[in-house]
Image: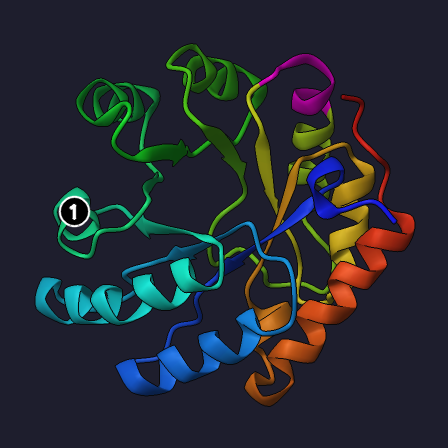
Amino acid sequence: MTGPENRCRLVLIVPDIADADEQANILANALKGGDVASVIVPQYGLDAGAFQKHAERLVPLIQNAGAAALIAGDSRIAGRAKADGLHLTGSAAEIAEAIDKYEGKLIIGGGKAADRHTALEIGEARPDYIFFGKLDGDIKPEAHPKNVALGEWWASMIEIPCVVMGGTDPASALVVAQSGAEFVALRLAVFGEPGQAASIVAQVNALLDEKAPRFED
């Protein structure tokens, strides 16, 4: 039985829920379902104070489950919440600046990599990962074909890991895995029915264990 380290792993994107307690409970349940590499916490429409409250509630939950907690966009809140990293959706220059500032202290990744040229620009900054898609881009059952194609191209050429946004169907994780991408990000596929989140995480891991291609050492 091989572990998840040698195949595509799951990244969760926290759903947009204004109540911090409800959001935390739903995420904690999902994390009971099995292997999750990291969890990205977006700000959505929260002001800075509310976002910090959410982050401080979620980060320990994520870390206690063995996953990396990544705060989207706000380095101050990432620091205050003692998160593991920062997910950025800006330019290559923004990512490069953050890497210079936080290298060795925070995981830095993300990027608005909508095409190969932009992806390569971001790659020159040597982020910890590059993200293909949008955090709220799961608007169809399947992963966006353009993002899957970018992930396949990137994974075949570049050592920096990539995360590809999946769709609203949990089975979209396998399509991403078959592209060679190291990580698949899911949001509504897991949290669309919050009571099922743990079982869906378990199902996705079982699917990837059974059918995802294995990486070479």
Residue 155 is one of the magenta-drawn residues: yes
Residue at 55% of width from left, 49% of height from top? Answer: 37
Q: Is residue 172 left or right of residue 117?
A: right
Range of magenta residues: 153-159
Residue that lies at the very extreme toward the left in this rendered image: 49
Residue 19 visible, this angle: no
Pick the residue in front: 118 or 171.
171
Amino acid at pointer 1: Gly
* Residue 160 lies in quadrant: top right
Task: Count every numbered label the image shows and give the total.
Answer: 1
Residue at 64% of width from left, 69% of height from top? Answer: 189
Residue at 51% of width from left, 21% of height from top? Answer: 119
Q: At which x and y percent is residue 120?
A: 51, 14
Q: Residues within 10 Å of mark 1 (few under 14, many from 20)?
A: some
Q: At which x and y percent is residue 170?
A: 73, 65
User: In which quadrant of the rendered image does the C terminus lie?
Assistant: top right
Q: Is residue 74 left or right of residue 188?
A: left
Residue at 21% of width from left, 49% of height from top? Answer: 78
Residue 161 visible, this angle: yes
On screen, residue 117 above or below 155: above
List the residue tagged with mark 1. 79
Residue 3 is one of the magenta-drawn residues: no
Q: Mark 1: which secondary structure? A: helix
* Residue 40 lies in quadrant: bottom left
Prevailing secondary structure of the magenta residues: helix
Pick the residue in front: 209 or 74.
209
On screen, residue 125 above or below 132: above
Q: At which x and y percent is residue 180?
A: 76, 32
